[in-house]
Image (spheres, grey):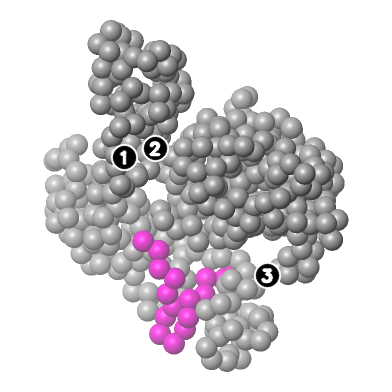
């Protein structure tokens, strides 16, 4: 029996056909020469989820769907046609406050999918499938990612930086540094150039003797320190976790960039209250995000931090690729759960993206943030959080956040409310002579 061999598309097609014909993992493994545990892992690793209904019925995964008597959950009705009961509408699960998800018990044991299920045509629950083409695509994507990026931990980057950056600042070239420090660096010259280009070191491209003379690549790639950071934390895992913990408030996290290579903002957006915090950082790296989390946790206390930020959703930026350091404090106590959006799917954290529009009123895209301090950014956020939102019943995020968590937390964060008639959404707030710091 073949071991340590990657599965090929032909073998994945045989797995899909075997599942469609209700064959066991052992029988499928015997056909393609693999152990049954290999087939089980392959199926569970590459599931696809479909929210489809049955003949004449829309998708509905609520455990109360047979006895539900709810009508007109949304008024006016948003459906394309009118229904006697909301349970017949595909918007029902998203609108009903009494929604409780039901998962088919058959999916909790082998084969974990609906491929060969005879009741599929009458089932309205969320379905799971194994598709060979989808599994092959995910495999190739993971294989490509494993061969790119940076295979260094935060500690290794810091150690390497302590050797390389001081020598670069003396005007030495990377060729000279590599030639005379082989025992302490043990990396090629091209690798060091790449790491400097990724802004992993204190020294930048501008500090290299000749690097700035070369034209940069047209396509900028994202590079991750921890390539496996999204395992168990992707967008599907996020929704599974929310289904198990529906009462946990959601926080969305992102970076706002002014001019590339300069200072950058870390934004933390509390979705329910639309309240946003922003922290200015000297570089868009993982270390600065971890430092911001640690400072916030230290200021609020662990229990308060866990209460207001138990669940964090962010994107796939390289600055967020050390989730363990964000989820646990210095004493290895869990303080939050971090999940990631799908690649190129910023709409999945649309509340934060929409709120960034207010920041752009002060700092347009492409404008450097280097002149600003944290006091300037805090003053800007005070004005943004004091601006009334129609979605909050014409209340401002500051008031809603205070109602949910208390004024004491806002005082600990140094946040203050601006009087309604003094709220200013103009760059003058950040300039000398602008609105006073509150």
Q: Nearer the viewer, mark 1 or mark 2?
A: 1
Asked if residue 435 lies left or right of residue 430, the reply is right
Residue bearing the label numbered 2: 224
Q: Is 331 placed left or right of 224 in the picture? A: right
Asked where in the image residue 48 lies, by quadrant, the reply is bottom left
Residue at 54% x, 66% y is: 102
* 61 in the magenta segment: yes
Query: Would you say residue 243 is visible in this rendering?
Result: no
Q: From the viewer's side, name the closer residue of 252 and 339.
A: 252
Q: For the stretch drawn in magenta, what is the main secondary structure?
A: loop
Q: Which residue occupies 79% across, 39% down?
A: 414
- Judge by depth and name the residue closer to the eye, 295 or 365: 365
Q: Distance between the residues labelled 3 and 2?
A: 39 Å
Q: Which residue is disc 3 drawn over?
A: 97
Which image quarter holds the C terminus? top right
- Which mark's residue is nearer the viewer, 3 or 1? 1
Image height of 181 relative to 239, above or below: above
Give the magenta range.
48-63
What secondary structure is found at the residue carrying circle 2? loop
- Residue 43 badge: none
Q: Quadrant of the N terminus?
A: top left
Could you say which is closer to the camera, residue 17 or residue 393?
Answer: 393
Distance of mark 3 from mark 1, alpha carbons? 52 Å
Q: Closer to the N terminus: mark 1 or mark 2?
A: 1
Marks 3 and 1, the one that precedes in the sequence: 3
- Asked if the residues shown at circle 1 and circle 2 are in contact, with their CB atoms under 8 angstroms apart, the answer is no
Residue under pointer 1: 216
* Residue 121 spot, x, y in % from top left: 37, 79
The earlier-in-sequence mark between 3 and 2 is 3
């Amino acid at each position: 029996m073949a071991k340590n061999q990657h599965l090929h598309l032909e073998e994945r097609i045989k797995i899909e056909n075997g599942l469609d014909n209700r064959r066991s993992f052992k029988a499928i493994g015997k056909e393609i020469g693999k152990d049954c545990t290999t087939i089980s892992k392959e199926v569970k690793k590459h599931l696809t989820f479909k929210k489809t209904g049955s003949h004449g019925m829309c998708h509905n995964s609520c455990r109360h769907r047979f006895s539900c008597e709810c009508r007109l959950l949304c008024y006016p009705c948003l459906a394309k046609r009118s229904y006697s009961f909301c349970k017949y509408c595909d918007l029902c699960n998203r609108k009903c406050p009494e929604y409780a998800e039901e998962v088919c018990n058959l999916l909790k044991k082998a084969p974990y999918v609906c491929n060969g299920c005879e009741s599929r045509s009458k089932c309205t629950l969320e379905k799971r499938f194994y598709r060979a083409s989808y599994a092959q695509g995910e495999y190739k994507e993971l294989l490509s990612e494993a061969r790119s990026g940076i295979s260094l931990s935060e500690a290794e980057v810091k150690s390497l930086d302590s050797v390389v950056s001081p020598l670069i600042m003396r005007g030495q070239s990377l060729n000279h540094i590599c030639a005379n420090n082989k025992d302490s660096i043990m990396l090629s010259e091209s690798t060091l150039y790449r790491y400097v280009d990724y802004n992993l070191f204190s020294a930048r491209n501008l500090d290299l003797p000749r690097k700035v003379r070369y034209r940069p690549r047209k396509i900028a790639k994202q590079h991750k320190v921890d390539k496996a950071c999204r395992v168990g934390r992707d967008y599907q895992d996020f929704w599974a976790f929310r289904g198990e913990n529906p009462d946990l408030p959601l926080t969305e996290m992102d970076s706002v960039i002014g001019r590339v290579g300069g200072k950058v903002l870390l934004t933390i957006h509390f979705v329910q209250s639309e309240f946003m915090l922003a922290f200015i950082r000297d570089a868009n790296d993982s270390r600065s995000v971890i430092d911001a989390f640690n400072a916030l946790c230290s200021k609020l206390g662990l229990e308060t931090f866990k209460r207001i930020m138990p669940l964090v959703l962010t994107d796939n930026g390289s600055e967020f690729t050390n989730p363990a350091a964000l989820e646990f404090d210095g004493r290895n106590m869990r303080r939050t759960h971090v999940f990631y959006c799908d690649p190129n799917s910023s709409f999945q954290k649309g509340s934060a993206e929409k709120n960034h529009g207010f920041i752009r009123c002060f700092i347009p895209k492409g404008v450097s943030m280097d002149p600003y301090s944290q006091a300037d950014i805090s003053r800007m956020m005070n004005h943004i959080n004091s601006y009334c939102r129609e979605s909050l019943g014409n209340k401002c995020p500051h008031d809603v956040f205070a109602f949910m968590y208390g004024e004491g937390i806002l005082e600990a964060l140094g946040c203050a409310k601006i009087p309604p008639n003094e709220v200013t959404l103009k760059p003058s707030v950040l300039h000398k002579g602008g609105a006073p710091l509150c």
